[in-house]
Image: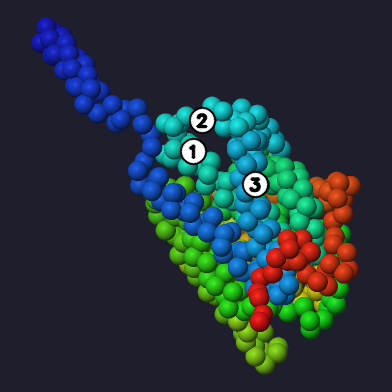
Amino acid sequence: MKQFNFTGAKTMKSFNIFALAILTCASPSLLASEINAGDTAWILTATALVLFMTLPGLALFYGGLVRTQNVLSVLMQCFAICCIVSVLWVVYGYSLAFTGNGSIIGGTDALFLSNLTRDAASGTLPESLFIVFQMTFAVITPALVVGAFAERMRFSAMCIFTVLWVTLVYLPACHMVWGGGYLSNLGVIDFAGGLVVHATCGVGALVAAIMLGPRKGFPGSALVPHNRPMVVMGAAMLWVGWFGFNGGSAVAADSNAAMAILVTHISAAVGALTWMSVEWIKTGKPTVIGIATGMVAGLATITPASGTVGPQGALLIGFSAGLVCFYATQIIKGYFKIDDSLDVFPVHGVGGILGILMLAFIGKPDGFLGAGSSGFDPSVLEQFMIQLQGVVVICLWTFIFSWLALKVTGLITPLRIDEQSEFEGLDITEHNETGYHTS
C-alpha cells in the first residue's frame, strides 16, 4: 500500500508539472495578466462619458445660463480647465492623489507617470485606464467652480486659480477619501464624489463668490439666462454622462455598477420633478431652468450614495435633493445676498453633503427604509458620525485653501475685470470674440 501511494504521488506530481508547463506555453496570459476585458471595456466607456460631462455638457449648461456677452468666456474657461488639469494630473496630480501612505497627501513615486508601462495593471484594469478615468473627475471639479464667478473673473486669474485650487484642495481631498488617506482609514463612504467633487467645488465656489463680490445689477432681472435650449442640451448631456460618473466608480462591469446607474437615474428624475413642483407651487409656472437644475441636484446628491443605496433610497434622496437644494438657492441669493452666479454651492455643495449624510441612514439594510446593501459594518449612528466628520474636514479644508488660492492669485493678477469690461462682456474684453453676430 505504501509503495502504491508513493508511486501514485510521483505520477501525480509529474503530471502536474507537465500540465503546468503546457498551460504556461499555450496561454501565458492566463497566468500573467490580471486585466479583465469586461471591466476594461466598461471603464473605457465610463471615462468617455465623464469627459463628455465637462465637454460639452457642463460648458453648454453654464454657457446657456449666462448673458449673451459672456457665453464664449464660459466655454473657454471649461475648455482651458480641461487642458490645464489634464497636464497637472500627468505631472504630479495622480501621484499626489493615489500613491504614498500620507494621511493628507500622497507621494511622488508617479511624477510625470515615469514608471507607467503599457502592461501595468490597477486591479482588473490597465493602470493607464484608471489614471485617465480619475483624471476626468479632476477635470470636472474645478470646472464646476466656474459657475460661481461667471461673468466677472479675469481669464488669467481663472487659469492661475485653477492650478492652485486643484493642487491645494482637490488633490488632498482625493487622497484623504479615495487614496488611502485619513478619511479613507476613518471609514468615510463616498462612492463617486459627494465630498471629493461636490463638497469641494461647492465650498470653493462659495468662497470665490464672496471674495469677488456680486455682479453689477445683482440681484436684478437683467441677470437672466440668454439661451435656455442650450441649458437643456447641456443638462441632458450631464444626465447621460453621470452614468459613467457613478456607474464607472464601481471600477468593474458588475452588479454594483448596474445598481449605481439605476439609482442615479431615479434620483435625477425625482429631483427634477420635485424642484419643478415646488417652483410651480411658489410661482405659478414650472420652468425649464428649474426642472434642469432639479435634475442636477438629484444627480449631485445621489453621487456619494450610489454604491450603497437601493431604489427606495434613491426615491428619498431625489425628493430631498429637489426640496433642500431649491430652498438653499433661495437662501444663498435671497437672504445672504451672495451672487453664486450659477448656484454651484446650493446645488452641488449642499447636494453632495446631503447625500453623504443620508447614506448612513438609507444605505444599510437595518437603516431607515432598509433600502441599501450591507456596504459597511458600523451602526447607523456610528456611520453618520463618521460621515459628518468627513464633511467637517473636507469643508474646512476647502474653505481655508480656496481662500488662500484666491489670495495668492490676487497677488499675481487682479481677480476681477473692471466695471466697463463687465458691462461690455468677457467675450470681447478677455477674448476679442463674440458668440453671436447680428446683421
Mark 2 — residue?
116
Proximity of marks 3 and 2: CB atoms separated by less than 8 Å: no
SS category of the residue bearing label 3: helix
Mark 3 — residue?
85
Q: Quadrant of residue 345?
A: bottom right
Mark before the other along the chain sequence, 1 or 3: 3
Q: Quadrant of residue 267?
A: bottom right
- Front-most of residues 373 and 58: 58
Mark 1 — residue?
128
User: What amino acid is at disc 1?
Assistant: Ser
Proximity of marks 1 and 2: CB atoms separated by less than 8 Å: yes
Q: How far apart are labels 1 and 3 at the CA level?
A: 16 Å
Q: How far apart are labels 3 and 2 at the CA level?
A: 19 Å
Mark before the other along the chain sequence, 3 or 2: 3
SS category of the residue bearing label 2: loop
- Residue at left 73%, top 66%? 427
- Crowding at mark 3 (Cα within 10 Å: few <14, some 14-19, many 20+): many
- Residue at left 49%, top 65%? 240
